[in-house]
Image (cartoon, grey):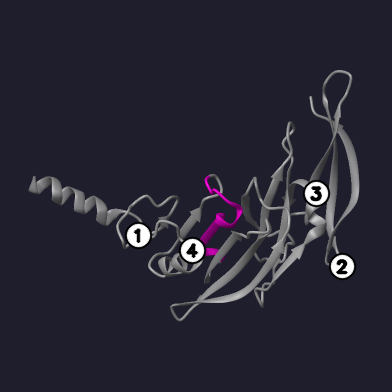
Amino acid sequence: MIKQIIVFLVVLALLPSDKVIKRIVNTKPSVFLTPNINELLKEALKTKTVEFNNSYEFDSVDKFLFFKSGHILDSLEANAIAINGLADTTFSIKLYSLKNLKWNLLDSISNLRDFPWHFDILFNDYNFDGQVDIYIQVAISNGVGFSYGYIILIDPKTKKLELHKEAEDFANMSIDSCSKTIFSEQWHGNDSLNQPQFTILRNKWINGQLMTIDKRDTTFK
């Protein structure tokens, strides 16, 4: 029995310090059952990474919460991102940075419409300035499965958030860093042979806005 306990403690000590909080089911007083942003920020002070996502199991819009902390935007700075739903079916995003063992709110955007019923989040450099940005998926169309959402750029110096609503019209966005291009797709239905008809759009940043510079039609066989 003593040997089993020792083996358990050794294995426990070797576990990584990163922590992913998916769903809290422990009823001990020290564990929060329904975490809020402040509780998650406190937890994020204790370990390198904390992630919480209840997008598949919230029972009302204002209970939706996504949280992630760590070096997600910058290799030299720890950040935390919190996205939560509001009672009026909008949602907000908050960006924090860790300074002197304290989380500081850098910026936030509220009243984002189109509540993300098909929530997903991606971290990429969408405007090719060397700073990781954010894509929030809010919807997926039925059938073909087109992803729609928000691009939120992050200023490399100030870390301020910049919402680009024009990106809502671009489905299935993919990045080509070499040509500094964002490709997107439009579906036009199926032809007489039941083959999907698409338009591939080539989009670039022009005067701070994502704009389509050319397009081509194609058939997916």
Give the number of the mark in front: 1 or 2.
1
Q: Amino acid at mark 2?
A: Asn
- Give the magenta-colored segment's residue range: 57-73
Q: In the structure shown, which secondary structural element does the residue marked by tag 4 occupy? A: loop
Q: In the displayed structure, would residue 48 be above or below residue 3? A: below
> Badge 3 is on which residue?
170
Along the viewing direction, whichever of 42 and 77 lies nearer the viewer: 42
Mark 3 crowd level (few <14, some 14–19, many ≥20, 10 Å Cα): many
Gap between marks 1 and 2 measured at Cα: 49 Å
> Badge 1 is on which residue?
31
Along the viewing direction, whichever of 52 and 221 lies nearer the viewer: 52
In percent of width and height, residue 208 lies at 83, 67
Give the number of the mark in front: 3 or 4.
4
Gap between marks 3 and 4 measured at Cα: 33 Å
Query: Quick one: label 3 or label 4, which is nearer the N terminus?
Result: 4
Query: Quick one: label 3 or label 2, which is nearer the N terminus?
Result: 3
Q: Is residue 70 magenta?
A: yes
Q: Amino acid at mark 3?
A: Phe
> Left or right: where does residue 142 sit relative to residue 18?
right
Gap between marks 1 and 3 measured at Cα: 41 Å
> Badge 4 is on which residue?
36
> Badge 2 is on which residue?
207
Query: Quick one: label 1 or label 2, which is nearer the N terminus?
Result: 1
Query: Quick one: label 1 or label 3, which is nearer the N terminus?
Result: 1
